[in-house]
Image: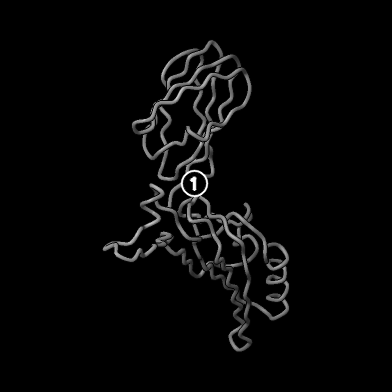
Amino acid sequence: MKPDIKINGTSMLSLGWLRESVDFSAPQSQSDILVVPGRNSPIRYTEALGRVSYQPRTFDLTFTMLGSRAAFDAMASEVVNRYAGQLVQVICTEDPSLYYVGTIEVVSSYAPLTGKGTLVLSSTDADAYRYYVEQTVVAITGSGTVILANDYMPVVPVITTTAETAFAWTVGSDSFRKSVSAGTWEFPELELAPGNNSISVTGSGTTTFTYREGRL
């Protein structure tokens, strides 16, 4: 299978473009510091906040075609009209389970001597995290303990209950308890860390946890 890129679900290969190269930069941490006079070490905000945050990711996608100038202009115009300035989802065929999110800018060029057209799609504001195409859904009926497995990105699940339900969980040294009626809920305190997260559920109905995992 030829390497391809899908943008918002549309294959660039199906539009006539051959993928030449992809360059997804590694996300860089936000390492702001504050130098305090008389203090030997700076205050590092990443440490003060308790977690590392990341700057926007950049990427460049290069595509080519062979043909007449008229054919190139028509193909390039279609891509520009579809994606220029748009916030899009980008999927590489080598890793179809994950997608990038970023605003696309388009640069095109044509070499008349060789009949080769080049199209570069780039983004400077892409999210640091890549997201899983499929959401994770975990359901339990009645009472019990639920294990919510999560990849690297912290995420708060959406909880749907069909009856009055109580929840209990521990984060570090802090313990939390919530009691809710039937409905859809989000608890900011219930932020899933990487790995397995244990939550106690007490109730007679069905409880469903839905969340989208992500990784750098």
Picture coordinates of residue 10, whole percent (x, y): 64, 55
Which one is in front, 123 or 161? 161
In the image: residue 79, left or right of residue 90: right
Q: What amino acid does circle 1 point to?
A: Ser
Which one is in front, 175 or 83? 175
* Residue drawn at point x = 56 percent, y = 70 percent: 63
Picture coordinates of residue 88, whole percent (x, y): 62, 56
Coloring basis for residues: one colour
Q: Residues within 10 Å of mark 1 (few under 14, many from 20)?
A: few
Count of labels in the image? 1
Picture coordinates of residue 54, whole percent (x, y): 45, 57
In the image: residue 69, left or right of residue 136: right
Identify whether 3 is placed above or below 192: below
Q: Which residue extends farthest bottom?
A: 113
Which one is in front, 76 or 37? 37
Q: Which residue extends farthest front?
A: 38
The local secondary structure at tag 1 comes to loop
In the image: residue 216, left or right of residue 62: left
Q: Which residue extends farthest top?
A: 204
* Residue drawn at point x = 53 percent, y = 55 percent: 100
Which one is in front, 187 or 194? 187
Identify whether 116 is placed above or below 153: below
In the image: residue 112, left or right of residue 152: right
Picture coordinates of residue 179, whole percent (x, y): 53, 19
Identify whether 200 is placed above or below 28: above
Residue beneath disc 1:
97
